[in-house]
Image: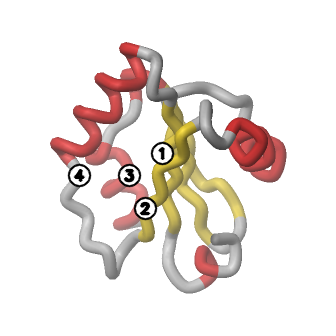
Amino acid sequence: MLLQSTTKPVLIFKHSTRCGVSRMALKNFERDYDIDKTDLELYFLDILKYRELSNEVSEKFGVHHQSPQILLINNKSAIYHDSHYQISVETVKDILLK
């Protein structure tokens, strides 16, 4: 994934399958998501199933763990992150256009 971010931005959507807020944020994100796969690689990370990986992601990019949370990775660095109801496909698209 890190290597992949050197050729195309990567978005990680971290979420809990047991949390109502996480479920709603994921539902809204999926509804609004219309970014072409050629422009962005998207990964969903179930933090309950892969907690250790979720912690590694937070540590690697220096971002405090939250759920739900998105991290936009470009050239091996987190260039944007947000959580809960601030998660927005439009914001991700705006950042990609910069």
35 over 63 or under it: above or below: below
The residue beneath circle 4 is 33
Q: Position of residue 18 (x, y in %)?
A: 46, 19
What amino acid type is highlighted by mark number 3?
Answer: Val
Q: Position of residue 62 (x, y in %)?
A: 79, 43
Residue for point 27% across, 47% down: 90
18 over 52 or under it: above or below: above
In the picture, the disc for residue 42 is: 2
At mark 2, the secondary structure is strand
Image quadrant in which you'd find residue 26: top left
At mark 3, the secondary structure is helix
Closer to the N terminus: mark 1 or mark 3?
A: 1
Q: Are marks 4 and 2 in contact (CB under 8 Å)?
A: yes
Image quadrant in which you'd find residue 54: top right
Residue for point 49% across, 33% down: 15
Residue for point 70% across, 36% down: 51
- Seen in the image, is 49 located left or right of residue 70? right
- Seen in the image, is 42 located left or right of residue 12? left
Closer to the N terminus: mark 4 or mark 2?
A: 4
Q: Are marks 2 and 1 in contact (CB under 8 Å)?
A: yes
In the picture, the disc for residue 13 is: 1
Could you give the CA–CA distance between mark 3 and mark 4, rounded to whole angstroms? 10 Å
Closer to the N terminus: mark 3 or mark 2?
A: 2
The residue beneath circle 3 is 92
What amino acid type is highlighted by mark number 1?
Answer: Phe
Could you give the CA–CA distance between mark 3 and mark 2, rounded to whole angstroms? 12 Å
Residue for point 61% across, 38% down: 49
Closer to the N terminus: mark 4 or mark 1?
A: 1
Could you give the CA–CA distance between mark 4 and mark 1, rounded to whole angstroms? 12 Å
Q: Nearer the viewer, mark 1 or mark 3?
A: 1
Q: Residues within 10 Å of mark 4 (few under 14, many from 20)?
A: some
Q: Position of residue 87 (x, y in %)?
A: 39, 34
